[in-house]
C-alpha cells in the first residue's frame, strides 16, 4: 500500500530533550515536506526537500532540523524542544511534477512540557 | 503579503443540500490549486486539483471552480451527506514546483 509513515504517533517530552520524528514513504517520491498544524493557523510548512541531499526552509523553520540522506526518509529533528513546539506535525510527499496531490502521514502529536 | 483565506471557520448545512466553500488568495499567481479533506486527528487527503487554464473540475459529487481574475476557487459538494462532515483545505502552488501553501480550512458539518 502506498503510504507515508510517521513515528511516533504521540510523544510527550520535556523541554530541551532532543527528539526525532521519523517519516518514510514507499512511493519513490522526490518531494517531501514537514508541516505543523495549530488551531486557527492551519498547516504551516517547516522544511521541504526536492530530492536527496536537497533541503530548504519553509515558513517556520526555527528550532527544527531535517536531513534527506535517502529518498524514502525525511526525519524531523528538534535539537532542544520548547513548549511552543507543542503541535500536530505532518509529513507529506509527492512527485515533483505530474503527481496531482500530496500524500500525508497520519500525524505526530507532540507535547513539550 | 501573500495570503490564503477560506471563507469561514465553520459551515453547517442540512443533508441533501449543496455545500459551497470559498478559497480566496492575494499576491499569488498559482499554476494550480488543490483541495483536501481532513478528518479530526488525521492527515489531509487529496481530493482535486484544478489548473489555472481550467474553469471547472468535477469528481463524483464534487465540483471545483477556479477564477484567476477574482483570485478565487469555489468547492461544491452536491447532495451532501453527514459523512461529508470534515474540514476542507485549499492549497496553492507557490512556484510551480509542488511547494504548496495551505489555507486554515473550513469545518463543514452536514446535519441529518
Image: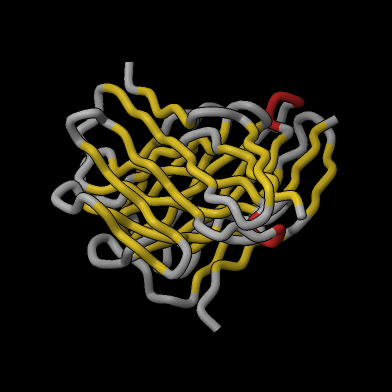
Residue at the bottom extreme of this rendering: A1
State the count of labels.
0
Q: Position of residue A56 (x, y in %)?
A: 35, 41
Image vertical order of residue A107 relative to residue A26, above or below: above
> If the image is split into quadrants, where does the C terminus of chain A sit?
top right
| Residue B88 shows up from this direction | yes
Asked whether, in this view, residue A107 is left or right of residue B112, the answer is: left
Q: Residue at horizontal 48%, vertical 31%?
A: B6
Up-down: is A21 above or below B83? above
Foreground: B108 or A38?
B108
What color scheme is it? Answer: secondary structure
Tell me the quarter of the picture where residue B23 sits.
top left
Residue in view at x 50 percent, y 70 percent = A25
Q: Quadrant of the rendered structure where residue A81 is?
A: top right
Residue A93 drawn at (x, y percent): 44, 61
Residue B83 in percent (x, y) is at: 69, 62
| Residue drawn at point x = 71 percent, y = 58 percent | B82
Q: Residue at x 34, y 56 (%)?
A: A53
Res. A58 image quadrant: top left
- Position of B51 with respect to A39 (left or right) is left
Residue at the extreme left = B53
Q: Name the residue nearer the viewer: A88 or B5.
A: B5
| Horizontal and vertical percent position of residue B101 | 40, 38
Amino acid at each position: 500500500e502506498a503510504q507515508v509513515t510517521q513515528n511516533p504517533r504521540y510523544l510527550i517530552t520535556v523541554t530541551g530533550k532532543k527528539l526525532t520524528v521519523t517519516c518514510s514513504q514507499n512511493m519513490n517520491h522526490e518531494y517531501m515536506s514537514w508541516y505543523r498544524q495549530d488551531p486557527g493557523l492551519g498547516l504551516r510548512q517547516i522544511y521541504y526537500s526536492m530530492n536527496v541531499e536537497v533541503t530548504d526552509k519553509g515558513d517556520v523553520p526555527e528550532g527544527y532540523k531535517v536531513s534527506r540522506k535517502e529518498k524514502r526518509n525525511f526525519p524531523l529533528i528538534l535539537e532542544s524542544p520548547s513548549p511552543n513546539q507543542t503541535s500536530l506535525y505532518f509529513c507529506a510527499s509527492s512527485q515533483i511534477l505530474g503527481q496531482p496531490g500530496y500524500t500525508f502521514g497520519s500525524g505526530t502529536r507532540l507535547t513539550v512540557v | 503579503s501573500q495570503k490564503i483565506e477560506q471563507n469561514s471557520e465553520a459551515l453547517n448545512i442540512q443533508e441533501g443540500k449543496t455545500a459551497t466553500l470559498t478559497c480566496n488568495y492575494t499576491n499569488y499567481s498559482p499554476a494550480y490549486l488543490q483541495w483536501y479533506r481532513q478528518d479530526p486527528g488525521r492527515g489531509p487527503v487529496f481530493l482535486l486539483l484544478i489548473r489555472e487554464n481550467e474553469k471547472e473540475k468535477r469528481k463524483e459529487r464534487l465540483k471545483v471552480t477556479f477564477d484567476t481574475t477574482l483570485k478565487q476557487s469555489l468547492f461544491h459538494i452536491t447532495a451532501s451527506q453527514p459523512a461529508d462532515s470534515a474540514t476542507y483545505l485549499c492549497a496553492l502552488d507557490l512556484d510551480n514546483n509542488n511547494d504548496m501553501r495551505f489555507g486554515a480550512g473550513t469545518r463543514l458539518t452536514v446535519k441529518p
